[in-house]
Every structure is written in C-alpha cells, then in structure tokens.
Image (tube, rainbow, N blue to C red):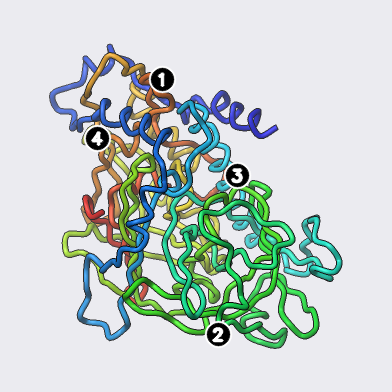
Amino acid sequence: MAAASSNHFLLSFPLFLSFLFTSTLARLSPQTTTTTLDVSSSLSQAQHILSFDPQSLKAFAQTQTQPLFFNSSTSAAVFSVPLHSRGSVHKTHHTDYKALVLSRLERDSARVDSLSTKLLLALNGVKKSQLRPLPTQIQAEALSTPIISGTSQGSGEYFSRVGVGKPAKQFYMVLDTGSDINWIQCEPCNECYQQSDPIFNPSGSSTYSPVTCESKQCSSLEVSACRSGKCLYQVSYGDGSYTVGDFVTETVSFGNSGNMNGVALGCGHDNEGLFVGAAGLLGLGGGPLSLTSQIKATSFSYCLVDRDSTGSSTLDFNSGVPADSVIAPLMKSRKVNTFYYIGLTGFSVGGQAVNISPGLFEINESGEGGVIIDCGTAITRLQTQAYNALRDAGVALFDTCYDLSSKSSVKVPTVSFHFGEGKSLDLPAKNYLIPVDSSGTFCFAFAPTSSSMSIIGNVQQQGTRVSFDLANNRVGLSSHKC
C-alpha cells in the first residue's frame, strides 16, 4: 500500500515532477537570469548516501559546537547543538536511489496531508473532546486510557544531537518546526522502533519527574489522560506513526553550551512508525509546550545541509540573525499557534516576476491562506493558483522531466522568492532541481496543494541559515551559512 501510494504521488503529479527540455534550455534569452546546476556533484552525493556508513559520524557526535552567530543584545543563554540530515545518521536500506526518493516522497506526502489537517481542524473549530482515539496496541497494564493528539505532523528528515537527563545521555532527535510536543523513547518499552542510540532509561536520571494531571503542562496537551494522578500523552502522525507514554519534565542539555531543567516532554513507552534512527522529537513550533517556548528563546536558527550530504551544521538558540540576511515578516495565525508564517509576496523565474493575484499568500481573517516555513516538509507546496503561475512562467520549461545524464553542469533560469520592500532570495539551482534517480533524471521540486496554506519546504532551505527572530517577529534568510 505504501509503495503504491508513493508511486501514485509520482505519476499523478507531473506538475511536481516538472522537468526541462534540452531544446528549451538552448533557447534561453540573454535577458534571462540563470544559475548553474552542478549535475555531477548532485549525482555523486546521491550515490554516496546509499553506501555511507553513519558510524563514521560517531566521533563528530562527541564534538562540542559553538553557535555561528552571537547576538550580544540579549542576555538569554546561547545554546548550540549539531544538526545532521537523516541519511547521515541512519543508514538507508535502499540500494537504489530512485527507491530512496520514493520513500522520501511517501513520508513527505503524509507530512503535508497532516499539516493541512491540523489547519483544517482549527479552521472548523474542532474541539479536543470531539477527537476520536487512534487505535493502538497498548496493553491495558501499560496504559489504561488511550490518548491521542488530534493532529499529525509526519516524520523527520533532520536530526539534532541533544542530551537528556542528569547525568546527560546524548540522543539524535528529529527537528520539527511543525509540531510542539517534545518526546523521547523510554524504557521500559512495550513497543519501540530501532534508534541509533541506546533507549533512554528514566531510572538513570536524577531529574526525571512525572507531570501531574493538574499541571499547566498537562492541560496544555491537545488531548491528555490520567493514570494514578500522572499525566499521559499520545501524539499521532500522518504516516501512521505514533508515540504514547508518560508526560514528564527532564533536563535537556545542549552540548557544552548549557542545559535547561524542567523541560516538559513525552516519555514514550509505545512508539511505532517511520522515526527509525532518531530517539525522539524536538518540537520547535510556536505553541506553549515547544522547546523554544519552554526555554523562552528570543530566537533560534538552523542551517539544513543538503539532504544527501554527510556533512553537518548547527541548531542555535538566542544567537541572533546574520547581518547579511534577507529579512521577511514572521507572522502567527490566531487559529494555529504552532506554525511559522512568512511574508512571501511572490516569486520570479529567470529574473521575471511571476504574475499572481495581489494578496494570494496573505492569511485572511478566518485563518485560511498564508505561507509557512517548515523544516519537516521536503518539497515546497504552493496554493494551486500560485503553482500554476510558476509553472506557466517557464512555458515548456517546467512541463516534463529533464534527462541530464550527458551533462556535468547546466545553466537554468533562477527561481527567486520575494518578500516585499524589494527584498528577495535567489535559490541555488540544486534547491529546486533535484535528482530522482542515479542516472541523471532531475525534478522541479515544487508541487501544488489543494490546501489554502502553502509551505516552503526543506529542499528550498538547504544551505540557507533560517533565523526565527521571535522577539521582533521576523525571519532572516542567509545563504551559505552552514
């Protein structure tokens, strides 16, 4: 069923798999702004990730990190932790790159559906009490009351390295700006998936503390339940993954840059799905239970390395915004406080503005529309009208697949995001033309969505430091800052 779903995604979205014709490229106008796609490098990375051994990262896992930027205007503690792509932490079982791409698309499709569902529930005013439990195989003695989150967020593609407990044990955790609940797999396990590190054992930590049902943290969960006066949680995800367990507070440490006590997180005893490799998840959304909210971060930033890269970068808190950043407005919806909306006003192809309706990307009073920036979604999703305008701007340019097997590099029209007041960000070619097999087929990495909400995904963010200045409601985008 899963394979059929991802194949359907490929076949039913020629708009997503928009590719270039050689003859069309040859007719590029001298006035067209272009950028160079390094075909050889992209294909080399694609081949390398299939055979990469994550064990070679073990030495780096112990390396202490420092934030790349420091904002002396704030007295808040500055934290920094390593950041890796999924493929560099957990060895893929795929031996064929196309199969790896299909598995990514499957996760990505589920992710987008779940984010859209989260918004739809909020727009329709669905209450927590109206949500129906997700069937699980939790035994009665393990959890007496089933609990669910009414929303889904999907699986992660980028992992951070953080410490949990006291003394701290180091774990790879999924980075997620589209969710709020932090959680980690815990002993004893009723059902746990494979992870790269030993499973966290609460009995080995002096700061592990269950959260009571009357606590503010427990009442902040979308759905909660009680057992013997202690708070229980469950979060379900769009791909069928879920985590269930005790809601607790623990110490979270950030390498040698410091730690925070009393961070509320889920201690999952039954965890199933596509989170293979990671020990859990760091929720970086805008809700009250997110890590950013709990540590009272004035800002946070990340730089996502290429998803096929075995390199690494950092996730920083309170480190400021690079001076050369393109600045865009950061907005919040009154309906969903998790998502980070960015003030995208339009885009251009080859230096020519794409013709779209004014206000197409604005959030209306009912909470519909807008553009969120999300590290967990891969392929950027544009509201259908905006996608069609982008596709049509290239005429035949973005209509079919492009076979680049005979090329080592190729010039392609530059795609740029616009944020108002004349500010724009030019995307590197590899951030919108991606290989889908190891033989040289490249895809245009945008897709339409029937949802009113558009999403800027992580493929378009690769190599760019994305800084969320929460104190000043702005987003900074700075190229080549990994």
Q: What whole-number distance in Å separates the C-alpha atoms at marks 1 and 3?
A: 24 Å
Q: What whole-number distance in Å separates the C-alpha atoms at marks 4 and 2?
A: 54 Å
Callout 4 amino acid: Thr
Callout 3 amino acid: Ala
User: Are discs 1 and 3 less than 8 Å apart at CB?
Assistant: no
Query: Nearest the camera: 31 or 402?
Result: 402
Q: What whole-number distance in Å separates the C-alpha atoms at marks 2 and 1?
A: 56 Å
* Secondary element type, mark 2: loop
| Number of the label disc, if any, that sits on residue 18 | none
Quadrant where the N terminus lies? top right
Instruction: Count residues near mark 4 (Cα–Cα under 10 Å), then give few for <14, some for 14-19, many for 20+.
Output: many
Residue 46, horizontal then vertical, whole percent: 37, 31
Q: Looking at the image, is mark 1 or mark 3 earlier in the sequence?
A: 3
Is 336 on the left-hand or right-hand side of 436? right
Q: What whole-number distance in Å separates the C-alpha atoms at marks 2 and 3?
A: 38 Å
Mark 4 or 2, closer to the camera: 2
Mark 3 or 4, closer to the camera: 3
Residue at mark 3: 110
Residue at mark 2: 206
* Residue 124 can be seen, yes or no: no
User: Are discs 4 and 1 less than 8 Å apart at CB?
Assistant: no
User: Are discs 3 and 4 less than 8 Å apart at CB?
Assistant: no
Residue at mark 1: 401
Quadrant where the C terminus lies? bottom left
Q: What whole-number distance in Å separates the C-alpha atoms at marks 4 and 1?
A: 18 Å
Residue at mark 4: 414
Residue 413, horizontal then vertical, whole percent: 25, 30
Residue 151, horizontal then vertical, whole percent: 65, 59
